[in-house]
Every structure is written in C-alpha cells, then in structure tokens.
Image (cartoon, helix red, strand yellow):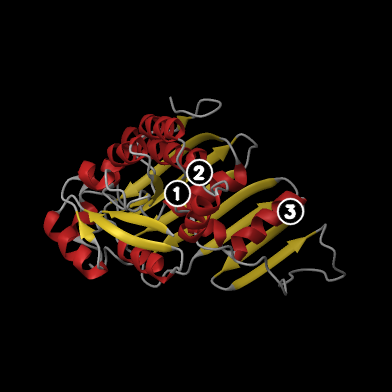
Amino acid sequence: MLNVAMLSKWHVHADGYAKHLQSLENANITAVWDENNERGSAWAKELGAGFESDLDALLRREDVDAVVVDAPTSMHADVMIAAANAGKHIFTEKAMALTVAECDLISAAVRQAGVKFCISFPARTRPHHLFAKQLLDEGQLGEITLLRIRNGHDGALRNWLPDYWYEEKLAGGGAMMDLGCHPMYLASWLLGQPKRITSMFSHFTGRAVEDNAQCSIEFANNAVALLETSLVTYRTPSAFELYGTEGTLIVSGDSVQVASKNADSPLQGWISPYRLPEAQPLPLTQWVNGVLNDVPMPFGLEDGTKLTELLETAYIAHRERRTVEFKQPGGCK
C-alpha cells in the first residue's frame, strides 16, 4: 500500500487525482497540505485525511511515502525539492517548473534522494498518439516534415476556470502553460531536439495571462510543429496531424485515418485502421505501481525538463517578439 499526501488543491486536476487514488486498491491518501489553509483543511476532511498547515511537518510524517504535487506552478521547485529531501516519491502535475534552471535543481534533489519521480503526460498514454509513435518508429510515414496539434476549450470564454488560474505570479502563464503543455510534450516525444521557436500569444478576454496561443517550432531533423491552444474556443475538437515524405496521419476526435506508400495494404488512398494500440494506464496509476514495484517511471525528469525548456523558450519568444534558437543539446539562448 502506498500512503500518499496531496500537496495543494490549487490545480484544477487535483480533485480528479485524489478520486483516482481513492479508486486504487494499492494507494491511500493519508494527509493534505495546501498553501491556502482554509481550502486545504476542508479538502482533508472531505478525503478523510489529516491536514498539515506546515509543509515540513507533513513531510516528516511516517504515514506519508509519496506526494502528489498540485501546488501553483511557481511553487513546484520549492515543494518538490523539499519532498525529495524528505525521501518522498513525487508525482507532479505539468508543468514541472517554470524554468529549466528550476528543473535542474529538482532533478538533482530527486537523484540525490533516490526517490521516484513522474510527471503527468496523459496524452502519451492514448491509443491514437501511441499509433502515431508506432508509425513514426516503423518508418511508415517516411521522414516527418510537419506536425500540427490543436488543443482548446472555452474555460476563459465561459468563466468556468477559477479566477486564480489567470494570476501570472502563481501560474506562470496562461493557455500555453496549461493546455499547451500537451501539444508541447507530444511534439518533443515525436520530433526530438528543438532548433528554434516563434510564438504568438493574445489576450482575447483581457486577462493578465494569454488565453489564445500558438507556437511554431523547427526541430533538428528539419520537421516543423504547429502547436495551437486556447481557452476561448467553443466546443473545440482536438486535432492531430502528422505529415511525412511517405505518408500522413490525421486524427480528429475519434476518427483516425492514415495514408502511406509503405503501408502493408492493397488499398489505395486513406485507410482507417481497424485496431489501434491499447491505451496505457494513466500516469498516476503507472506512478503508484512503479513506486510499489520499483520499476522505472514512464515520464521522468528528462521528459519534464524538455517540456519546461519548450515552454520557457516559447514565452521568451513571445515577450521579445523574435525567433529564439535552442542550444544543442538543451537550454535556450
């Protein structure tokens, strides 16, 4: 049994993570800490867990083996370093941190402590994205030339996100720092080392952080990714398009179509695959199982750092209104 503490209810996914842990037979929520004492105390009662207003006191508890971090993104580095130093395994909501420098500090603490670390990359567990990686690895699409991903909803337009979601000091950014994480880490996973990036962020609802955003990224293999995200689009169907010199994959909602010169099929034109890879367990489930069974984490420190590298550089490109080049490998100029 893995005894887990929930570190803040700030993130909109925090309650969902708690409910998921409660549904597992091998996990138990024993304690809660929150930077907002009133919110945390009420949540602890709801979960039937103890509440600690002092993070260090929580991390000293013997009934806490691991922590789920849903604190404001700006607090991630301090919270996770403290958890690692206390010998607690860590699951964190994306983004890992606001800067690569902070990610490096977290990584050093985790490695020094020898604890398990996992970041929530749910899009990498889904069948159509696993299918894209399979096609890419098998060479069915040839050399990749273009990736386009759209991910959006109307949270800012219809005001169903909490007001603090738009506080730059806490969140570190808006649409790209939130929903934009998914296209970003998918692009990194599929295309490898980024080469240069441009960004265009806008403030449709007039809030402090962007609610509509897109980034264009060129990778070292000369592929280009067009990543679009928004908090102001109504009923936005997700879109995933992967183009190569030998084939194309188009995913729209539940519809998947592929065309490849190398496909093992007598059919010409578009093919709808009759079977996709099975969905992998959610990252939180994989983390719990990984800690208990001492197996490698699916989405670790390097993955989290690569995402932050893309995000940090995207915001630099937006603020400075220029194309920003990446150092090879890693880091930004």
Measured along the vertical axis of the image, is residue 271 above or below residue 220? below
Q: Amino acid at mark 1?
A: Ile
Seen as rendered, the residue at the extreme left is: 38
* Residue for point 48% across, 59% down: 150
Residue 38 position, x and y percent, is 11, 59
Q: Nearer the viewer, mark 2 or mark 3?
A: 2
Q: Amino acid at mark 3?
A: Leu
Q: How many marks?
A: 3
- Residue 300, disc: 2
Answer with mark 3 or mark 1, whichever residue precedes in sequence: 1
- Residue 119, disc: 1
Circles 1, 2 touching at the beta carbon (< 8 Å): yes
Front one among 182 and 63:
63
| Residue 234 visible, this angle | yes
Q: Which type of secondary structure does the marked residue at label 1 adopt?
A: strand
Residue 177 position, x and y percent, is 35, 48
Front one among 202 and 291:
291
Q: Is residue 9 left or right of residue 133?
A: left
Quadrant of the image for the C terminus? top left
Seen as rendered, the residue at the extreme front is: 62
Circles 3, 1 touching at the beta carbon (< 8 Å): no
Answer with mark 2 or mark 3, whichever residue precedes in sequence: 3
Q: Is residue 333 left or right of residue 126?
A: left
Answer with mark 1 or mark 2, whichever residue precedes in sequence: 1
- Residue at which label 3 appears: 141
* Residue for point 50% across, 53% down: 292
Residue 146 position, x and y percent, is 61, 49
* Residue for point 55% across, 56% down: 124
Measured along the vertical axis of the image, is residue 43 above or below residue 94? below
Q: Amino acid at mark 2?
A: Gly
